[in-house]
């Protein structure tokens, strides 16, 4: 099987493998595409929480992006953890040079265990500059609240916040509704012409580590293969929902989901 497309991931590393660049690479690979990476930070963590974060020099981040794309041009880019203004400026400078149109931003701000992963000045720069550069932004409820200074308690609040993000320059917005305590999970996609509510069954499990990273990478993969943004969101949500349902139950805290749900192993490897 040959890869269907090429995806560059710009994100932080998760030593436990459930989120970050590790989850991104697993997702892109499991969905049949080729993953490249730019590491923005190294975290020491497991399913119970984040112990430490070490940022990569912004100059090295810039060089990773440029040098990789100079040789293998990606069809789409997924951006995850960008923890400081210098890192965001470095990424923006690289994006301006490589000129890739399909860019998906997952504005990673807080880890599942509650650790803060981005500083306040970086959030301001993300809102001012980066959000206008990307094709789609995929915040969860807490991230959307931070970006829009809006309290989100229901579907109507999600739509209001999504419209505020459009006002900041976003082209397409997908707000993930998993943090609201409803029987079903409602994710809301919106742009200036369209609105779509994706409803999924909620699975009772604490093993949801890396769902945001996985979803944004799945959407990026589908978009890199030529699927429209709304359809890519729908397919990405289905993939993540299946991965949550069949989680491997690893770890003592918020365990990872099953990125391999899309694969059928050929009998000769069994």
Image: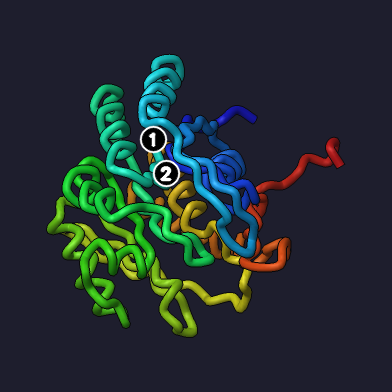
Residue 239 in view (yes/no): no
Farthest-out residue, top: 71
Q: Quadrant of residue 47?
A: bottom right
Q: Look at the numbered disc 2 and give the secondary structure of its residue.
A: helix
Residue nearer the viewer, 191 or 177: 177
Work out which residue is located at the far left of the displayed protein and give it: 167
The residue under the point 64% across, 56% down is 46
Label 1 sits on a secondary structure element that is strand
Give the image location of residue 120, x and y in percent. Answer: 28, 55
Closer to us: 260 or 44? 44
Residue 131 numbered tag: none
Give yes or no for contact between labels 1 and 2 (Cβ–Cβ under 8 Å): yes
Query: x, y (%) of residue 177?
Result: 40, 71
Residue 188 visible to the viewer: yes
Instruction: Locate the C terminus and report the quarter of the image it occupies.
Output: top right
Q: CA distance from mark 1 to mark 2?
A: 6 Å
Residue topped by disc 1: 76
Residue at position x 48%, y 66% in the image: 114
On screen, 117 above or below 178? Answer: above
Task: Say above or below: 172 vs 179.
Answer: above
Q: Residue at x 39, y 21 (%)?
A: 63
């Amino acid at each position: 099987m040959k890869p269907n497309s090429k995806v560059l991931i710009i994100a932080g590393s998760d030593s436990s493998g459930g989120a970050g660049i590790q989850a991104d690479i697993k997702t892109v690979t499991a969905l049949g595409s080729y993953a490249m990476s730019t590491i923005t930070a190294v975290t020491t963590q497991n399913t119970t929480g984040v112990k430490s974060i070490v940022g990569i020099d912004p100059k090295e981040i810039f060089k990773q992006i440029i040098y990789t794309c100079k040789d293998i041009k990606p069809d789409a880019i997924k951006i995850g953890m960008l923890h400081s203004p210098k890192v965001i400026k470095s990424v923006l400078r690289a994006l301006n040079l490589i000129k890739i149109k399909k860019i998906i931003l997952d504005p990673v701000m807080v880890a599942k265990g509650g650790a803060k992963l981005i500083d306040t000045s970086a959030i301001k720069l993300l809102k001012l500059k980066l959000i206008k550069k990307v094709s789609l932004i995929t915040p969860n409820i807490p991230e959307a609240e931070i970006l829009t200074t809006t309290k989100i308690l229901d579907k109507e609040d999600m739509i209001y916040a999504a419209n505020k993000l459009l006002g900041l320059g976003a082209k397409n917005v997908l707000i993930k509704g998993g943090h609201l305590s409803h029987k079903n999970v409602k994710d809301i996609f919106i742009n200036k012409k369209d609105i779509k509510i994706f409803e999924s069954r909620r699975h009772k499990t604490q093993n949801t580590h890396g769902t945001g990273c996985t979803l944004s990478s799945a959407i990026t993969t589908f978009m890199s293969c030529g699927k429209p943004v709304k359809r890519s969101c729908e397919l990405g949500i289905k993939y993540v929902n299946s991965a949550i349902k069949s989680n491997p139950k690893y770890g003592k805290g918020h365990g990872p989901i099953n990125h391999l749900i899309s694969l059928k192993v050929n009998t000769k490897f069994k």
